[in-house]
Image (tube, grey):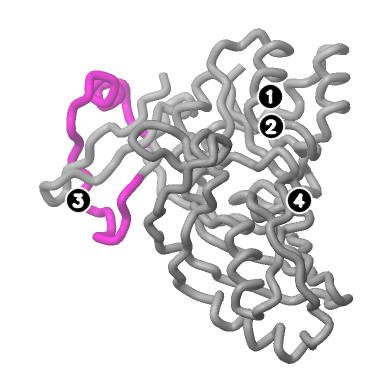
Amino acid sequence: MDGILNINKPPGKTSFSIVATVKRLSRERRVGHAGTLDPDASGVLPVCLGRGTRIVEFLLNDTKTYLAHIELGTTTDTYDGSGQIARKSDPSGINQTQLESALEAYRGSIQQTPPMFSAVKHRGQPLYELARAGVQIERKSRTVIIYRLELLSWQPPLATLEIDCSKGTYIRSLAHDLGQSLGCGAYLKSLVRTRCGLFHIINAIPLPQLEEAFRYGYWQHFVYPIDIVLQHHGAIIVNKTTEDIIKTGGALSLEHRADDVHHCRAYTLDGNFLGVLRRGHRKGLWQPHKVLL
């Protein structure tokens, strides 16, 4: 079975453990998730199966939406509730106007430093391994984009935010940095990913329901086709000769494609998804990027 599962990851489980569960249940060797969720976080976790793992990069580049509960007045070493308390202070002087004003600095293109407790690697070693050993490393900031940052509710000391953001955004870092801006500290109390690209939490299957679907043999009904995540790219239908060219890595001439289009879906005459083409360096030439047949 080739495709994508939209799984509602429960809190307390790692993204890797969800992949391991799907491998065990499906007996498919090629399984991978598209965007790690922290163990304490819950929500949308796309899991790709079979040839679906070939298009993970397109899912990783999609925007995400999060529902974040941030508690002011407490700082932890992990920036979330799983860590040790590093500092406590009184946030009672913070009002909603001050909070809204502080949030303005985190909208748009911003610089963000990954937390020490993260999977970012330093000389091949994940930062969280160094952090657990008590080693602190100076991390480089990176550019991320916060497309939307909305304060849904303010019930001191708890702020509930909804965030649309680019790949690579750490909501834990956002919570920590917000606390620093306000001078009282803050940590991410809970986090739910409500959307990853076109996959929404309203359609995400809970793990117990997925396990039941495997048990009774109807789990394939929850598998999305591979090309669903590529629908915003243009498409071509090719004949058998062109199909063979694509399968052998040959370039194609597609002169009619707009200059700002960089990928294109290709289908066979009988409607099978053949793969993804990518614009080449020479004008009008397209190279096979992902061949799935």
Residue drawn at x 70%, y 37% is 6
Residue at which label 3 appears: 255
Q: Position of residue 16 (x, y in %)?
A: 63, 27
Residue at which label 4 appears: 81
* Magenta stretch, residue numbers: 237-263
Q: Is residue 245 highlighted in magenta?
A: yes
Residue at which label 2 appears: 14
Going from the N terminus, do you reach mark 4 or mark 3 first?
Answer: 4
Q: What is the spatial separation of the Cα atoms under label 2 and label 4, in whole angstroms? A: 15 Å
Instruction: Write down the quadrant of residue 266 in the picture.
Output: top left
Q: Nearer the viewer, mark 2 or mark 4?
A: 4
Q: Position of residue 134 (x, y in %)?
A: 54, 41
Q: What is the spatial separation of the Cα atoms under label 4 and label 1, in whole angstroms? A: 20 Å
Amino acid marked by disc 3: Glu
Discs 1, 2 touching: Cβ within 8 Å: yes
Please tell me whether mark 3 sits on a helix, a strand or a loop: loop
Q: Nearer the viewer, mark 4 or mark 3?
A: 4
Discs 1, 3 touching: Cβ within 8 Å: no
